[in-house]
Image (spheres, helix red, strand yellow):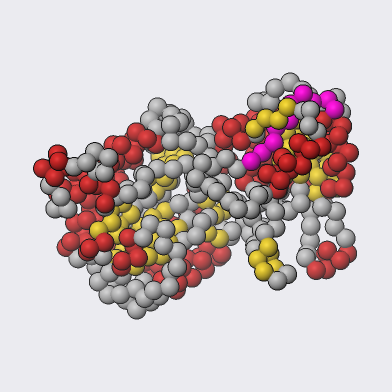
Amino acid sequence: MRYLPIGKKLFEKNRTRFAGLLPEKSVAIFHSNDQYPRNGDQFFPFRQQSDFFYLTGVEQEKSILILAPHCPNEKLREALFILKTNEQIAIWEGHKYTKDEARKTSGIKDIQWLNGFDAALKEVIAEADSVFLNSNEYIKFFSDVPDKNHRFVDQFRKQYPLHKLERAAPLLSKLRTIKSKEEIDILRKACSVTQKGFERILKFTTPGVHEFEIQAEIEHEFAFNRANGHGYAPIIASGSNACVLHYIENDKVCEDGDLLLMDFGAEYANYTADMSRTIPVNGKFTVRQKECYNAVLRVFNEAKKLYVNGNTINIVNEKVNEMMEREMIKLGLFSKEDVDKQDPDEPLFKKYFMHGTAHFLGLDVHDVGTKHEPFKPGMLLTCEPGLYISDENIGIRIENDILVTNGQPIDLMEDIPVTTEEIEQLMKKE
């Protein structure tokens, strides 16, 4: 791994908390991520399944975790099964975990080779009334390819049809939405690396460069600072591309006079930052661009204050929509009279601000958690109002990562330049 060791304590605490949610005489089973085929004899770069990493810290395919806290056999109350390497694997694929390395990383004492899993499973199942299996329950995710956890559900039902199956996902969601001190420290590091990437491109960006050249500068800074890479496909969108919410081609020339909207975040130790900034390609905002940018910035600064105990994403969205609507009237995009006559099912502001303001953040850029869940201390969410005026080639989004506390919200990206004055000053060419 590129990142510095983060210690087994985090994963030990996570397993203890998860086991504390399991009822008597139950077992939970988790699989690592698959190696996904790319083409020919190639796989896509491996990235560990987030729940598996959360519980083990192990960064290797073909691994299985059993948690059976009430099993009579103490060795199987926490058991990790990993691939047994050999000379051929070592030569062709490189190093794989030894048992001692897996033990040191995860804090799990009982490490077994993968070929012992079936026998161990049969033993723990014989003593269990309910079995918790994992699946990706993100409500907006649809995949044609079933992952290993999903396939194991089908396999388990055939092999053990009389056991009661339960969902592990709601338990993990309850835990993962509240970030521990160790997790917050890692996320701060991801934010710090993201800041370095942004400040680098402020010095680099100039009319005539390609969007992918800017992306390359970011990736250089990420690698240099031990980040895994991007936590999600980066958006480097100049001119009219900035009005495409999920533009990821990043292949156009940045033209003089255009704005450049960037949405990217470093992934450090599998935890990702998520930042958006909008800058003038030539280093100087026009009067209209600055007027629109400052409208979004005002809403952004007010919206951050909403990340307090008891609020929800739905409440944040509603209040930010109201603020953005008022700013749009000031910008002349429509009038108060137009709003009074609008179709309530198709409000006018949605033409210029069509996405939500917040989502949970952590091991995934769109992390576990729902829009209806009241904010609690330890939750981390994005704050990202935007304004998209395609007729004027203006696309603006400002986004930071906000930590909910017992007091005032904490902006983990408060040191990243955000005002027009800061951006113009840092973009000045010597």
- In the image, residue 51 lies at what x, y percent? 64, 42
On the question of residue 125 being in view, the answer is yes
Residue at 25 percent across and 58 percent down: it is: 389
Q: Residue at x 73, y 30 (%)?
A: 131
Q: What residue do we see at 73% from left, 53% from top?
A: 61
Q: Decide: is 345 above or below 225.
A: above
The x and y percentages for residue 146 are: 65, 49
Q: Residue 386 vs residue 199: left or right?
A: left
Residue ranking furthest to the left: 337
Closest to the observer: 105 or 362? 362
Q: Residue furthest top?
A: 24
Q: Is residue 68 visible?
A: no
- Image quadrant of residue 323? top left
Q: Is residue 289 magenta?
A: no
The mark tally for this picture is 0
Q: Nearer the viewer, residue 419 or 20?
A: 20
Instruction: Say whether residue 5 is left or right of residue 345.
Output: right
- Quadrant in the picture for the N terminus: bottom right
Range of magenta residues: 126-135
* Horizontal arrangement in the rendering, residue 349 relative to residue 111 (left or right): left
The percent coordinates of residue 137 (x first, y second) are 57, 40
Magenta stretch: residue 134 in it?
yes
Looking at the image, residue 13 lies above or below residue 54 = above
User: In which quadrant will I find the C terminus?
Assistant: bottom left
Look at 39% across and 48% down and name the residue there: 400
